[in-house]
Amino acid sequence: MIKNYLKIAIRNIMKHRLHTGINLIGLSIGLGVGILVFFFVQFELSYDNFHPESEKIFRVMAHEKIDGEMMESFSTPFVVESVFRSEFPQIEKITVITNGGVQAILPDETSQNQSFLMVDPDFLEIFGFKLIMGDLASQLQDKFSLVITETVAQRYFGQENPIGKTIQMKMGEVYLEYQVTGLLEDIPSNSSMKFEMLLPKENMDYFADRRGLDSWYNVWGQNIVKLQSPEQVVTLEKSMDALMQKSLGENYVKGEYYFTFHPISEMHFSQAKGNGGLETTKASLLWILAGIALLVLLIACINFTTMAIGRSITRAKEVGVRKTMGANFKQLVFQFLTEAFLITFFATIFGVLLAKLILPTFNNLFEKQLVLAFGTSQIFVLLGLVVFITLLSGAYPSFFLSALQPIKVLKGNLSIHFGKQGLRKGLMAFQFFISFLLIASTLVMYNQMNAIRDFDLGFDKDQIVVIETPNHSSASFAISIKEGFRKADLYHQALENRSEISSSGITMGTYGDNAYWDAAFPLEDGTAFNFKVNFIAGDYMETLGLKLLEGRRIDPSPTADSSAILVNKKFVEAFGWQDPTGELLPSTDFISHQIVGVVDDFHYASLYQPVEPLLITKSPELVLSGINNLMIRSSTNSKLIVKSGTDDFATFKNILETEWEKVYPGEVFQISFLDETIQQQYVSEDRLGKMVLLASMIAILIAFMGLFAMVAMSISGRLKEIGIRKVLGASGWSISWMMNKEFIFITLLGALLALPLSWYVMQGWISQFAVRQWPSLINFILILIVGLSLVVFIVTSQSIRAAQMNPVDTLKDD
């Protein structure tokens, strides 16, 4: 019996090759996209699930009221670890996690930048990172011990056993030896936390003084806790007010500074400040990609259904004959579903092959190492998808046609107006609705990203390279920055003497690298004034081409202008100064200083963020003397920004390297291009835009393939009508217009619903930018015109050909 069903199904599928081909291509593309997105979403949801008892692990989040607004950040004070450990018995384990980086000596005596995390010994007991060599209980107990990953062990020691061996790392001005006591398996690809090396937290002494480490208002990385049970979070948060009152003393104000606890399962999708270099993904991206994949697949299923409905007259006669011969309702339903199943099954195989084919491109686009591994669960999902699509695309034709009455079908009295017209038109309109929605959304993204790329940031970015100098670690921030700048100035002076160099400057922060400090100082009314800070030297303003509105620039001489301050226009507006030059900061805590000039507002951060008040100075002591709140999100390394004075980049780079070796012999030389760094800020949005564009093209392709098939079926069903109209004198163009009206109406209906909706939907996406630019109405009208033109072309090309047929051939049966 089943064998006969399969034979008949294969015969029917092969008989209608055009429809079968369109259904196979559409479903294969839809399933290929769907399979890729499924594995991507599955991979993203698997992040950090390898940690044992992960339901007990929480990240500490700081909440602080600033200018009447509660600010949230996972960057927390270093002191949290010791205080929470002693005050909260519910905490089983706790660790601080702080990023660091210094120069390290390789076996060939060259040096390289080596990043690491400074943590508590509890770190390895909280997380599930696999220790493959060394005793877990003894790790990170000694200040000069370290734990490394397999990749790092290979880099420093080759195939030798790394346990007991030492690595030299530069702390301050000297290289110190650190002994390897543990070897970790390389960090899993689905870990939000990526690192190469662990050092004990005591090494923070080389990067900050004790005053800064003990302050509740200076933040240093993150704090992670493991509780005895997850329910104890409520108890901890209820006890928080009492703890903060005890810790802050007279500075305590109820509800203005406290901490909460957030599950580690949320870490990969968190977009809050202070994520500390974690690998995160916007949860909305997963929903958007899943939605796109579903829409593309839905369009392919609609093609299947509309073509089945379009062939209803032919299949209705088949049903009538089968029922007359004794076939029952269930048998007919099974027959039609068998055909749908076969097409879906083969489309799934082709979809898997297509997914494997485009996987490298997908991984390159999203910078992932996604692998299509089909385990038991994935196979069950695929089989479930086959059944679901079979029912979704084949259910209506199967049950509708199987229920037809043979006597009406065979007498030719059957009317299936709803099945043949109403539902088919509605489904086609929905296809065009989805296609226009995607292409209009792509237009909004493309226009916005073009506006971002072309936006005047307020400084020059072309032909400028950024060179990061070696870190000068010190327990004092001021000393660390000053020493780094002192040596960087030697390099700056050497470059200034070369004609191939237009200008160069020294800075602690560059565009979008989060190196601008967040700081605040108290005002007389008890509130805090929040601003950004950057430290500079050399010809910083000239190199970037910053516009000076009032006053003068800071003297580039190393020993001059140590008390001079530059502020931006936003800073001036915040205090309402009419003549800001010569003004002092409105706080008595700052050491001797004076505002010497005002620079025009420029975007020192990405265009996701608005411009904030900015203070620029040479002297770190000046800033540190008066602030009461500080947040540092990156290293304190100084950077040189160098503008080329020649078009010969090879010569330009060679000069930079030559002078580098004189000032920093043996140190790693690395450059980046400022314009590329700027573009990197929008990589995720560019990726999303490319995905939506690709989905739009696929949706349009599938929709127009379905339109082509539907027009062909519609014309074949009306050949006799066309023949009669020609006999009565109708022209080919009038017949073509008759056919076009129906499809133009369907296209207009889908477009007029989709275009306004796309505007509404994209408001949420575009609102994340501080700078926004919508496409003009003309662009949306052009989309509509192009869509209509394609529809008219497809319908006209087929209808004109039908109108040219000899009426004798189409009417001879009558």
Image (tube, helix red, strand yellow):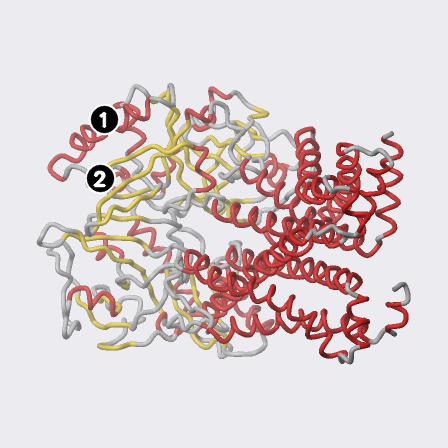
Q: Amino acid at mark 2?
A: Tyr
Q: Quadrant of the C terminus?
A: bottom right
Q: Quadrant of the N terminus?
A: top right
Q: Is residue 641 visible?
A: yes
Q: Nearer the viewer, residue 721 or 751?
A: 721
Q: Nearer the viewer, residue 399 or 410?
A: 410
Q: CA distance from mark 1 to mark 2?
A: 13 Å
**Which residue position is annotated with label 1?**
239
Residue that lies at the very extreme toward the left in this rendered image: 524
Residue at 31 percent of width and 60 percent of height = 534
Residue at 75 percent of width and 36 percent of height = 333
Q: Is there a contact, CB below 8 Å, between mark 1 and mark 2?
A: no
Relative to residue 88, is residue 112 drawn left or right? Answer: right
Relative to residue 156, is residue 329 drawn left or right? Answer: right
Note whether 22 is above or below 71 in the view shown: below
Residue at 76 percent of width and 55 percent of height = 22
- Report crowding for label 2: few under 14, some 14 to 19, many 20 or more residues within 10 A (C-alpha): many
Relative to residue 657, is residue 411 drawn left or right? Answer: right
Of callouts 1 and 2, which one flags the residue occurring earlier in the amino acid sequence? 1
What label sits on residue 257 in the rendered view?
2
Q: Is residue 661 visible?
A: no
